[in-house]
Each structure stands twice: as structure tokens, then as C-alpha cells.
Image (cartoon, rainbow, N blue to C red):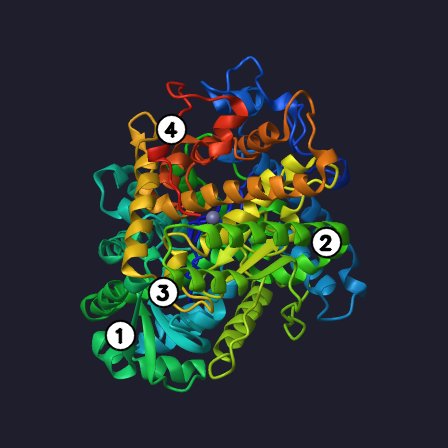
Amino acid sequence: MKACYPTRIAVALALLGLTATVQAHDAAPGAYAQREPAPSRLEVEDFGLPIGFSVKKMDRRADPRKNFQRYAAGHWLDVARIPADALRISPLDQMAQRVEIQVGDVLDKAARSSATAPKGSPLQQVGDLYAAAMDEKRLSELGVEPLKPEFDRIDALQEARDVAAISARFTFVTDESLILAAGVAPDYQDRTRYAVYVTDGELGLANPAIYTSPEGARIRAAYEQSIADTLVIAGNSLEVARKTAAVVLAVETRIARLRQNPVEARDPAKRYARMSYADLKAMTPSFDWDAYFRASGVALPREVVAMESAAMRERDALLRELPLADQKAHMKWEFLRRSTPYLSPEFDRPALALTRAIYGDAVVQPARHKIVAGQLTRKIGQPLSRLYVEEYFSPQAKRETEAMVALVRAQLRGRIERNAWLAPETRARALDKLDRMQIAVGYPATWIDYSSVDVRPGDYFGSITRINEFRTRRNFAKLGEPVREDTFSDPRATLPIIVNAAYDSGRNGIDIPAAFLQPPMYDPKADPAVNYCAMGAVIGHELTHGFDSSGRLYDAVGNASNWWTATDEKHFVAEAGKLVRHADAYEVLPGLRANGALAVGENLADVGGLNLGHDALRAHLGKHPHENRRIDGLTQDQRCFIAWGQVWASKENEGYLRQVTATDPHPPGNYRALAPAQQVPAFYKAFGIRPGDPMWLAPSERVAIW
Ligand SMILES: [Zn+2]
């Protein structure tokens, strides 16, 4: 689960189900190139260096035994600059910039040809939506007029008990959870069937700690101000706006105290509570669940799975305790903040002010077309991706990546078979899980069919609302059907236009999106070391997620179940503990240490990934000995670790680093660029690193799991 670049206040979307995705890399937080006026003439800012592997990025005066990061990517680190409208720069962010330009071309072309495209086709829908969103003049003229029918419904509320029916309506029109809400996803304990999940609405700030910590005071104040400013733009008096902002902050602070922290939320035993429908009603007596399900057109469930039970109880208590006028003001705000992205661009102003409070004053507003591209990615990601794949993805990239997947998978199989510490029964289950892992490259075998959605020219908010209704109806319609999961459909992790790859423990599957198969991850012209220790290591990383601290708690079909013997589990936890301690000792900023417990899954996956990428490289060179040669004076093994170090080199904004360390299971880039190599024996051999060298980590401190 990831916070992307918060151009809006709502930095986290409510997510039902088990997409506890574990990502090699998240969608870059808004690092984009300008592309005015003609997209085709614009290029990614490359600092005079290739985006992919290059010895020119190295600092060859540095000693790899003393400072491997400088040796591998020192020159790049010297010349790279964080763009004004971004929070971080890395070769993967540059790759995301290139994809952004490609997607921009797709959008421009669609907008030019949508008038003649068949109604309901991806070209018509994407083109008309994009053109409507780019018509800023019309959006400004409309103001909050499109919200009036929903505001009227809220005004007509007679008592708190009626909130449930309105909440159901908001589930449809926003495709998000407000107040309390339900959704359908595969049952986490039986992946052959769907379950009804119930949860409370997401908070406006991604990090719950900000609501209560003394250090959060400055951001809290900025948040309250941004709420008030947004309400004023929406037509409220300053007095009403300020009063409502205070109510919203008070409500969210009560909820935030009871929310799970990011470490707890990764444990399925803590995150999901199965209960009977009667128990749900007893747990949240003031919320009329019967009315909620009736209004949703869903039969009353016999049982549900509750996420965030403590926060749900608190929402219910608020229904009893808050005066009705405050409830209405709060609900209007909840609806407004989810709607502003699709209304007048004036609403960008308070959102930007909040973003600056979190990430620093240097952040500038991204250009309109970039903001819109992000919105379309979230709302009609698959139709947009279809157009992208037709234009930019080659069958060769798909074929070669699939071959790499097979070779890397074989290395993990070998490691599990040879592993001395696993009991035979745990080993058999691990092999079964690996063999049944579904790995898909590029795009889905079947695209989601959006053709029935009425996307109208010149109607941005209305079209988005109809898309939301379609998605929610489609979600509820799954109940009672056999489980058929949508692959390549997560807008933050797996859409074919997302620079990322992701393992989903809930279905034991990996999606490797088309957009990821470009330099620096994969280059059909590169030597094997470069591809195996970038893309190959990412494949290994995703495979390892099936067996990391969180992934190992799910079985071969994705059910949450512990298939480990007690002894094996003890050994695993002890080994993983080494990695927790290693990260805890790493200084991200002066006085700020990395979050070893939160990042242990990702760190295990990086170690496994680099081990497996390197193993696969050796296997490949064994079959193709003529490719095992020095290039630029460097051996294949040396190039392998340098390629890894270059892919993960990054420069990050301080506010971003603090946010990532507190909430993100992915460690900062510069930790990723070095730490995993220190766990791999071949790294020491490749560069002659010996005990006493600053890069040396004693074998007893190295993690040895996969
Ligand atoms: Zn990962």
C-alpha cells in the first residue's frame, strides 16, 4: 500500500481485500518532465548520462571496498538534481518520466481522435475524459455545482441513523469508503470464494501518528488550514469553513488514535476479524447496516470480515456523540475532498499548500496534464493501458522477460531444495507454493470491459461518477461468484503503465507491467550482468516476497495460514532479525534511523532478489560462456553489483525521507543500493573486500534464508 505524490489531500485510497502488495518500487512520487508545447519534442532530463547502466555514472576514483555507492554511481549522484515538481530522483524516476511522456502522447492522440472512435471504445473514453479534464475554463465555471444533488441529500438527513444509506450512496459515487462501508474481495482464509469486508473511511493524512504526535503539530495546523481553504473555495463563509475544519480534525484525531500502525497493518491476524453479521451490528449499533446493504442492492451477508475494528467502533460512537449539524458538515467534507480532483483546478491551491507543509516549500504544482494523467490512471487505468501497450510494448520484451522469469524461478527452486535448515514438510510446501506462483509479464490476458460506461464529452465529474458506479457495481456483483481476479489492475502497483512490479500474497501471483521493461531495468542490447542484476533481481525480489516475513504467512493458493514448523519459524525469525538490526543501525538522516521492523519484508526481498539475479546470471553464463567477458575493464560479476547500485541510486527530499521512513515498507533508495549486496558472498569476491574494510559485514551477521 503506497502513498503516491499527494497532489491532493487524500493521499491514501481505501483498499479492501488483500492487495498487501509488496512492490519492488512504487510509482515515482511525481517526477515528471515538462512537455510544453509539443510532447514529441520533449525528453527526460538525463543530466547528460544514459538512464540505463553506464560506466559513466561511476566514480572510478572511489574505492569499492570503502564506499561502494560512490564507486557504482558517484558521478550520477553528483550531477542528478531533484526536479522542482518532484520529491525524489532516481533512474527509476527518470524511467517514470519517460513513461509519463509516452502516456501523454497516448492521451493527446486519443483526445484528437475520440470524436470518430466507436462509443465505449478505449479511444473514445480515454480521449473524451482527457479533453474534458483539460478544459479548465469550463471546470472553473461549474465550481461545486456538480456536487449539489449529493449535498442536498446530506442536508435532508433527519437523524444519524440515516447516515448509513448515504454512506452506501457514497461508496458508489466515489468508489471509496466514507464513514463506514463494505466491499467485496476474496476471502483471506479461503481464496476460492469472495467475502464481504467492512471498514471505516480513510483519513486525510496517510500517517496516523501526525494526528497525535508533538512533531505533527505543524502539519496538523497546515492540514486544518487546507480544509478551511478548500471549504471557502467551495462557497462556504470563512466562519463556517473554520468551524468545519476544527470538527474534521477532531473527528480524524479520535479515529487516528485507534488505527493500526503500518507495522501492525502488515499482519493478517491483526488486520482482519471475521464475525457474524449480528456481531457486526452489535459492534457498530448506531450504523444501520441493513439500510447500507439494501441501498447497495446487496443481500444481507451472514458474516463479514472487519478491518480496523477499533477505528470502526469509534466511527460508530461518533454517530451517537456528534451533533447532527456537525455530522452533516463532516460528511459534506468527506464527499468534497474526494471530489475536488475532478472539479475546478482552484482546489489545487490548498492541496499544494498542504503538500508543501509536509514535503517542503520547494515543491511546485505539476502541470495540469500530469495531474490529469494521474487521475485517468486511477479511474480508467486499463483502457488507458490498452492504448499504451498497443503503441509501446514489444513482443520481444515480453518473450525475453518470460525466459528470464523461468531461469530466476529455477534458481529459487534449487536454493529451497538445497536449503539445510528447512524441515522436509516445510520444504515441500515452499516448493509447492513456488511452483504454483502465477507470473504474468506486460499486460492482462483479459482486460476489464468498461464499454458499458457512459463517458460524455465535456462532462468530467459526471463521467468520473459513472465510472465509480460501474466499478462499485462490478465489485459487489462478484459476491457468490467463483473467484476470478483482475490482474494488472492496481493503479498504484500493477497497471501496465506503472513503473513497478508486484507480488500479491493473496493470489500468490506476480505482475510485471509493460512500462517496467525499459532501461534501466531491461535493455535488449545490454550484456547479461546488467539485465540479470536489474530486471532479473526484481523478478527474484518478487519471488522472495512469497517467502518473506509477511508472504510466508500465506499458502500456495493465497490463504492466510501458517505452514511452517515451529523450529523452521524460529530459525526464520532469528535470521530476519539480523536484517532488522542492520536496517535499524542505518542512519537515513542525522538522528533518523531506518525502520527495520517495517522494512524487513522488502529488505529480505532485496537480498533474495540480488542473490537470485546473480545466481541466474551465473547459470546463463554457464550456458553461454562466450558472454562471460570483461566490458569496460569490468567482470560480469562486478557489472552485476554495479548495475544494482545504479538502479537504486537516488536523491530524496528530506520531508519525503521522513514520511517514507515512518510509513513505507520500502527503505530509502540509498539503503537499497548497498545493503543487499553486503549480504551476498559474491559481492565480496567481486571487489576483493576483506575484513576491516568499511564495506565488510561479518558472515555471522549476514542473513542466510533464501
Ligand atoms: Zn518488494
* Mark 1 vs mark 3, CA separation in Å: 46 Å
Most extreme residue toward the top is 61
- What is the CA distance from the residue labelled 3 to the residue labelled 2? 34 Å
Between 282 and 246, the one nearer to me in the picture: 282
Q: Nearer the viewer, residue 274 or 536?
A: 536
- The location of residue 686, given as percent across then percent down, is 54, 26
Q: Which residue corresponds to mark 3? A: 563
Q: Going 45% across and 46% down the picture, which residue do you hit?
A: 605
Q: Which mark is residue 399?
A: 2
Front disc: 1 or 4? 4
Q: Are marks 1 and 4 in contact (CB under 8 Å)?
A: no
List x then y, in percent, for residue 404.
65, 49
Instruction: Check whether the beta carbons of the residues at disc 1 and disc 3 lie within 8 A of each other.
Output: no
What amino acid is at disc 2?
Answer: Arg
For discs 2 and 4, the disc positioned in front in the rendered view:
4
Q: Which mark is residue 160?
A: 1
**Residue 103: x, y in percent?**
68, 49
Q: Nearer the viewer, mark 1 or mark 3?
A: 3
**Which residue type carries mark 3?**
Trp
Q: Nearer the viewer, mark 3 or mark 2?
A: 3
Asked whether 376 or 47 is in front, the reply is 47
Q: Earlier in the sequence, mark 4 or mark 3?
A: 3
Q: Which residue is mark 4?
A: 697
Mark 1 / mark 3, whichever is N-terminal: 1
Residue 127 in picture, x, y percent from top left: 71, 59
Q: Quadrant of residue 280?
A: bottom left
Q: Identify the residue at horizontal 76%, vertical 61% (top origin).
A: 114
Q: Nearer the viewer, mark 2 or mark 1?
A: 2
Whether the residue carrying mark 4 lies under 8 Å from ligand 1 is answered with no
Whether label 3 touches label 2, CB < 8 Å: no
**Mark 1 and mark 4: Cα distance apart in space:** 61 Å
